[in-house]
Image (cartoon, rainbow, N blue to C red):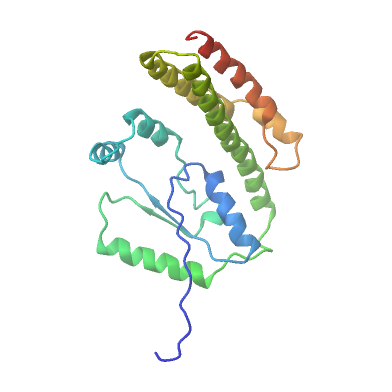
């Protein structure tokens, strides 16, 4: 209609966001500025993902996608109140029904922006759990940086290309095992009990991984 104001602005974050803590960081921003928040989770079978990946011009290794499938955390609408505006699509292909569900989700989210005072005991406990998960995410990023630097150092010492590939595979396996152990173990829990900020980098936890990386690299140089 003439003179009508601009419509709502949608910010679409298109990424894996495989940890709930990654998505929760976005929710916290929405809560800080009283914005609407919703999420669409595409639950695609692993084999379908692998097939589609092989059709890409630059496919990633199958191992990467398989590992992602084991790590990804599906929205828990029952446990996490902050994930109540979530839509889990299980179809491999988009349908008109999916379009209607997405439009309905967006409309509901727009009508119910996140309020800054939406806090309760259960949510605070959920925040604490997600805080620990966020620390694992930070550890993941630190591990990636350590591996990247280790690969550069190995290349600088003239490690053969064939051995560089083996080194990369071994370091990535080490990272996957380390992070899984971190999520299942008590080291991170004990650390989080002594910290007040989720943003604190788990440096002490990473030091052991750094030593393991050095041990692996030393076998190749």
Residue ID at (44%, 13%): 159
Residue ID at (49%, 53%): 77
Residue 7: x, y in percent? Answer: 46, 77
Locate residue 184 relative to residue 75 in the image: left or right.
Answer: right
Residue ID at (33%, 67%): 100
Locate residue 121 relative to residue 214 in the image: left or right.
Answer: right
Depicted 83 relative to depicted 43: above or below = below
Q: Nearer the viewer, residue 178 or 128?
A: 178
Q: Nearer the viewer, residue 138 or 123?
A: 138
Q: Nearer the viewer, residue 165 or 161?
A: 161
Is any atom of residue 30 visible in this view?
yes
Is any atom of residue 79 visible in this view?
no
Where residue 29 sits, quadrant-wise, is: bottom right
Depicted 54 relative to depicted 127: above or below = above
Residue 143: x, y in percent? Answer: 56, 28
Residue 23: x, y in percent? Answer: 53, 49
Locate residue 7 relative to residue 146 in the image: left or right.
Answer: left
Locate residue 154 relative to residue 200 in the image: left or right.
Answer: left
Q: How many marks?
A: 0
Where residue 187 sits, quadrant-wise, is: top right
Depicted 23 relative to depicted 6: above or below = above
Where residue 1 sits, quadrant-wise, is: bottom left
Residue ID at (49%, 48%): 76
Residue 213: x, y in percent? Answer: 55, 17
């Amino acid at each position: 209609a003439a003179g009508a104001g601009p419509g709502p602005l949608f910010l679409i974050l298109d990424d894996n966001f495989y940890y709930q803590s990654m998505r929760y960081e976005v929710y916290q921003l929405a809560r800080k500025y009283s914005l609407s928040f919703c999420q669409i989770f595409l639950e695609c079978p692993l084999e379908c993902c692998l097939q589609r990946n092989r059709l890409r011009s630059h496919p990633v290794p199958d191992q990467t996608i398989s590992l992602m499938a084991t790590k990804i955390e599906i929205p828990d609408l029952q446990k996490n109140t902050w994930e109540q505006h979530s839509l889990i699509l299980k179809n491999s292909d988009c349908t008109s029904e999916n379009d209607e569900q997405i439009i309905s989700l967006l409309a509901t989210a727009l009508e119910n922006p996140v309020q800054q005072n939406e806090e309760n005991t259960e949510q605070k406990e959920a925040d604490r759990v997600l805080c620990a998960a966020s620390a694992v995410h930070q550890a993941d990023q630190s591990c990636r940086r350590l591996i990247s630097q280790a690969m550069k150092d190995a290349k600088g010492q003239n490690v053969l290309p064939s051995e560089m590939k083996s080194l990369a595979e071994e370091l990535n396996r080490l990272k996957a095992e380390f992070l899984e152990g971190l999520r299942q173990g008590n080291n991170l829990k004990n650390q989080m009990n002594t910290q007040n900020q989720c943003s604190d980098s788990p440096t002490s936890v990473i030091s052991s991984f750094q030593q393991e990386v050095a041990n692996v690299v030393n076998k190749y140089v």
